[in-house]
Image (spheres, rainbow, N blue to C red):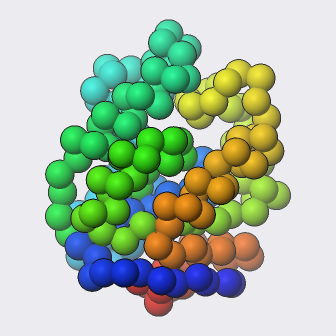
Amino acid sequence: MSVDSTPSREAENIVLIGMPGAGKSTLGVLLAKTLGLDFVDTDILIQRRAGATLATYMQAQGYQALRNLEALVIRELDVRKTVIATGGSAVYSAEAMAHLGRSGVIVYLHCPMQALAPRIANLAQQGIAAPADQSLEEIEAERVPLYERFADITLDLQGLDSRHALEALIQVI
């Protein structure tokens, strides 16, 4: 486990960012339950706003429309004492990330590609906001610099099961 921890403020919210399949939602629920916080998954908020699953919305409107809706939903989010699991493409909106950063600490859950690939069998069915011809490796290469840019803390999940990942996450926040 490697940790880069440089939070600049007391966190009212804990925001989880990272690649699809990294465990943001799973760890987010566990973290919220452990710390007695609320939990919000922005992918679910997007689906409610769209009236469709992420995949269905993206197929009908395109990946850019999904990214735009994600940014809008995040910019409108107003919660306190909450663990927020974001969609993997939240980092494409600097405004949305700034909004999240103003109310909490942003934790990048870094998960190695060999662990991600089996969790994401079909990119289109997952509703991953990316061009149809882009591979998971290309998506990762494009997004990792953004995750690193916006993160206050980076937690490397390599070799950690969910229990150990939760323990490591609690230690760094």
Left or right: 163, with 159 as reference point: left
Image quarter where the C terminus lies is bottom left
Please tell me which residue is depicted at 27% across the width and 82% down the height of the picture: 10
In this rendering, the count of numbered labels is 0
Residue nearest the observer in this picture, 170 or 149: 149
Left or right: 32, with 2 as reference point: left
State the image coordinates of residue 41 (x, y, percent, origin top left). 36, 49
Q: Residue furthest top?
A: 60
Left or right: 127, with 171 as reference point: right
Question: From where the camera sits, is residue 21 visible?
Answer: no
Residue nearest the observer in this picture, 123 or 172: 172
Please tell me which residue is depicted at 33% across the width and 22% down the height of the picture: 50
Q: Residue furthest bottom?
A: 171
State the image coordinates of residue 130 (x, y, percent, origin top left). 63, 30
> Where is 126 relative to 55, above or below?
below
State the image coordinates of residue 38 (x, y, percent, origin top left). 23, 63
Q: Quadrant of residue 34?
A: bottom left
Question: From where the camera sits, is residue 66 visible?
Answer: yes
State the image coordinates of residue 9 (x, y, percent, origin top left). 30, 81
> Where is 134 relative to 105, above or below?
above
Q: Quadrant of residue 13?
A: bottom left
Image quarter where the N terminus lies is bottom right
Left or right: 49, with 67 as reference point: left
> Where is 80 relative to 94, above or below?
below
Please tell me which residue is depicted at 35% across the width and 55% down the height of the picture: 98
Please tell me which residue is depicted at 82% across the width and 58% down the height of the picture: 114
